[in-house]
Amino acid sequence: MSLYQKLTKVMDDRDVEGYVELIHEDAEIVFHKSGNKFTKSEWASKFGELSHLTTDWERYYHWRPN
């Protein structure tokens, strides 16, 4: 399965843990508006706290590929 297919599947399934597994251990997530930077584990922790607030996955991933 290609990376695109895996990403699409975890997004469709709203699988936060599966999404985190796709992120490389050395990745640095940058919020461009604020400039805040997070490691994979920091981001996973913060996003995991937020993910239960909504079932609207695309709200968080407005960049979802078509």
Image: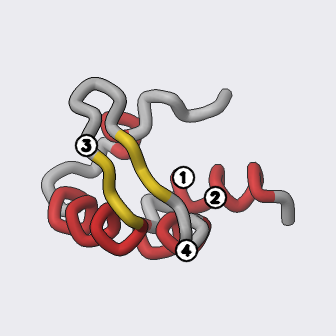
Spatial CA span between label 3 and label 4: 18 Å
Kind of residue at badge 2: Lys
Can you tell which of label 3 and label 2 is closer to the viewer? 3
Disc 3: CA contacts within 10 A as few (<14), some (14-19) or many (>=20): few
Q: Which residue is mark 3?
A: 36
Spatial CA span between label 3 and label 1: 27 Å
Spatial CA span between label 1 and label 4: 23 Å
Coordinates of residue 44 in the picture (x, y in percent): 33, 68
Spatial CA span between label 1 and label 2: 5 Å
Can you tell which of label 1 and label 4 is closer to the viewer? 4
Element under disc 2: helix
Residues at marks 1 and 2 touching, judged by CB atoms closer than 8 Å: yes
Kind of residue at badge 1: Asp
Residue at 43 percent across and 59 percent down: it is 14
Residue 12's disc number: 1
Residues at marks 3 and 4 touching, judged by CB atoms closer than 8 Å: no
Query: Residue 30 is drawn in which quadrant?
Result: top left
Q: Is residue 58 left or right of residue 45?
A: right
Residue at 35 percent across and 29 percent down: it is 32
Q: Which residue is mark 4?
A: 25
Disc 2: CA contacts within 10 A as few (<14), some (14-19) or many (>=20): some
From what the image shows, is residue 2 above or below residue 57? below
Q: Which residue is mark 2?
A: 9
Closer to the chain start, of discs 4 and 2, is: 2
Coordinates of residue 51 in the picture (x, y in percent): 24, 59
Residues at marks 1 and 4 touching, judged by CB atoms closer than 8 Å: no
Closer to the chain start, of discs 3 and 1, is: 1
